[in-house]
Amino acid sequence: MTETTLTPSRLWKQMTLEQRTRAARAFWEDPEATDDQVQAAFLIAQQKKFRPKTVIGLDVERKAKHLATLGGLPDAMAARALIVYHLTEQRPMMGAFLDALGIAHENGLIQEDAVKPDADKIGPAVAQLTQQFPPEDVRVYLNTLLSQDPETWGGLAGLPQL
């Protein structure tokens, strides 16, 4: 792996504090992320010199704030936070992008397993997305796709929006 390889952890570091806070809040509110949340509590405790029990007992807002201020997260944890963030906060953008690509979806979730976007549609779809949504949110979304599944979304690489 080269230094320029996009990973969820590197993408987390590139996000604004507000984006990381929103992603962290979604992460802590996800009922299916219990194992990752325990790992996050230990990571926060280690980095902030707290006891893990103290971190676990904090309210969601304070846990989100602490997680958002951590510069580095393990890739699996960052990936989970990014996915949950987009599913809870960015569904309209996800749906608009898939509509522009002509990919069947249900509220932003792709219905088929082996989807390959048409390379000719990617540029115009991204341009349309940046007209409809904040460019920073679009950048994080597209980079999330690229870091999670570079084989499917490799056509996004090199676009100026990234």
Image (cartoon, rainbow, N blue to C red):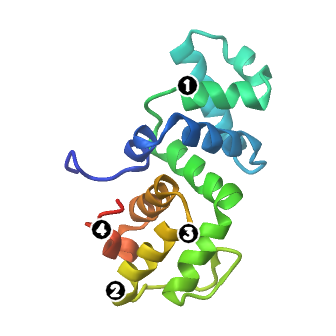
Q: What residue appears at the point 59 percent right and 70 percent down from the top-left corner?
A: 94
* Secondary structure of residue under mark 2: helix
The image shows residue 71 at horizontal and vertical percentages of 44, 29
Mark 3, Cα crowd under 10 Å, few <14 / some 14-19 / many 20+, is few
User: First in sequence: mark 3 or mark 1?
Assistant: 1
Give the residue at mark 4: 159
Decide: few, some or many residues near mark 1? Use Cα within 10 Å; few <14, some 14-19, many ≥20. many
Residue for badge 1? 43
Q: In this picture, is 28 found above or below 32? A: above
Type of amino acid at the residue the image marks with label 1: Leu
Helix, strand or loop under label 3: helix
Query: Label 1, label 4: how many angstroms apart (C-alpha)?
Result: 34 Å
- Three-letter code for the amino acid on which mark 3 is drawn: Gln
For marks 4 and 3, the one nearer the N-term is 3
What distance separates the C-alpha of mark 4 from that of mark 2?
12 Å
Distance between the alpha carbons at the discs numbered 2 and 3: 21 Å
Label 2 crowd bin: few (<14), some (14–19), many (20+), radius 10 Å: few
Residue at the front extreme, as displayed? 131
Amino acid on which disc 2 is placed: Ala
Q: CA distance from mark 1 to mark 2?
A: 40 Å
Question: What is the three-letter code of the residue carrying label 4?
Answer: Leu
Which one is in front in this view, the residue at disc 4 or the one at disc 3?
3
In the image, residue 105 lies at what x, y percent? 64, 83
Residue mark closest to the camera, 1 vs 4: 4
Task: Tell which of 23 and 49 is nearer to you.
Answer: 23
Instruction: State the CA–CA distance, disc 3 to disc 1.
Output: 36 Å
Residue with the mark numbered 2: 119
Residue 84 picture location, percent across and down: 65, 54
Among numbered discs 4 and 2, the one appearing first in the sequence: 2
Relative to residue 146, is residue 65 drawn left or right? right
